[in-house]
């Protein structure tokens, strides 16, 4: 299998080329505005692109995907929930458990709502999972954006992704890859959610709102993420810059 990625220099968001082999078939997953190195690889390795696949509708993951669809004259695929949020149309919808075939590849959708309602991960040939903004190397996605729901997000991580075989490689929506085994042992949010570590109980404010800091950890960009509980009982994963300790 061929897996290649580009990373936006500002957003740090990834776009991916996934193909079965040189001279074979593949898909482009997400768009970050820096897709040219992947297009060069497509041409160099004589890969036939069959689909453009979206994980979710956030702007840093959909740049230029319409142009990619037109360039290769292939369907643009997204969950029906994400498709309804796009300013352009998807050609094909895919839901939990359904698959896209590209040459010898099977690309199966795993519903991972929470960061966004229609968020999908994709498991390719049962070995590589593209986790987008749900699970990252060492951290997790945030849940205070439009339509985000913390409880769904934690279920998506713990019950959908972390139950994959430990050797499964993960390819996040931002920055470097990892494995399920590594995240099980090293991801500070996963560790507390699986009961290996205890949550903290530290008063804090989040953008001026009183809250309790339950877990402080790294973010993919070198800053921090925080799991917090508000006085209303609502829980969320927020950027560390929003938290005053």
Image (cartoon, helix red, strand yellow):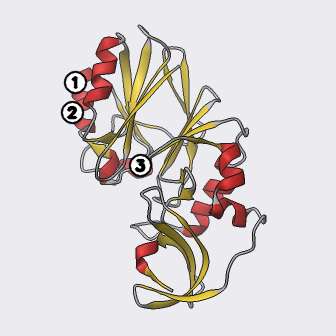
Residue 81 position in % (x across, y down):
43, 52
Q: Earlier in the sequence, mark 2 or mark 3?
A: 3
Residue 178 position in % (x across, y down):
58, 42
Judged left or right of residue 138, residue 61 is left
Residue 199 position in % (x across, y down):
70, 76
Q: CA distance from mark 1 to mark 2?
A: 6 Å
Q: Is residue 159 visible?
A: no
Query: Which residue is nearer to you in this view: 65 or 210?
Result: 210
Q: Which residue is mark 3?
A: 56
Say if 187 sits above or below 45 in the image: below
Q: Which residue is mark 1?
A: 71
Identity of the residue drawn at 65% across and 29% down: 126
Say if 243 sits above or below 166 in the image: below
Q: Which residue is mark 2?
A: 67
Q: CA distance from mark 2 to mark 3?
A: 17 Å
Local SS, label 1 = helix
> How many discs mark residues in the rendered view?
3
Say if 91 sits above or below 133 in the image: above
Query: Which residue is nearer to you in this view: 201 or 76?
Result: 201
Judged left or right of residue 42, residue 183 is right
Q: CA distance from mark 3 to mark 1?
A: 21 Å
Residue 96 position in % (x across, y down):
57, 43
């Amino acid at each position: 299998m061929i897996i290649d990625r580009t990373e936006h220099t500002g957003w740090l968001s990834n776009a991916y080329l996934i193909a079965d082999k040189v001279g074979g078939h593949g898909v482009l997953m997400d768009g970050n505005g820096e897709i040219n190195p992947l297009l060069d690889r497509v041409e160099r390795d004589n890969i036939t692109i069959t689909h453009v696949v979206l994980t979710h509708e956030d702007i840093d993951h959909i740049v230029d995907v319409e142009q990619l669809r037109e360039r290769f004259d292939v369907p643009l695929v997204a969950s029906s929930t994400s498709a309804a949020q796009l300013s352009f149309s998807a050609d094909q919808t895919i839901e939990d458990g359904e698959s896209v075939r590209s040459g010898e590849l099977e690309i199966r959708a795993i519903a991972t709502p929470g960061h966004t309602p229609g968020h999908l991960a994709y498991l390719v040939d049962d070995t590589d999972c593209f986790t987008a903004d749900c699970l990252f190397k060492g951290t997790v996605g945030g849940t205070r954006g439009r339509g985000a729901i913390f409880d769904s997000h934690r279920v998506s991580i713990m019950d959908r992704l972390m139950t994959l075989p430990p050797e499964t490689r993960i390819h996040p929506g931002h920055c470097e890859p990892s494995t399920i085994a590594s995240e099980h042992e090293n991801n500070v949010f996963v560790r507390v959610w699986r009961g290996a570590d205890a949550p903290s109980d530290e008063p804090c404010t989040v953008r001026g709102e009183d809250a309790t800091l339950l877990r402080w950890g790294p973010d993919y960009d070198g800053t921090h993420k925080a799991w917090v509980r508000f006085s209303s009982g609502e829980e969320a994963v927020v950027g560390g810059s929003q938290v005053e300790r």
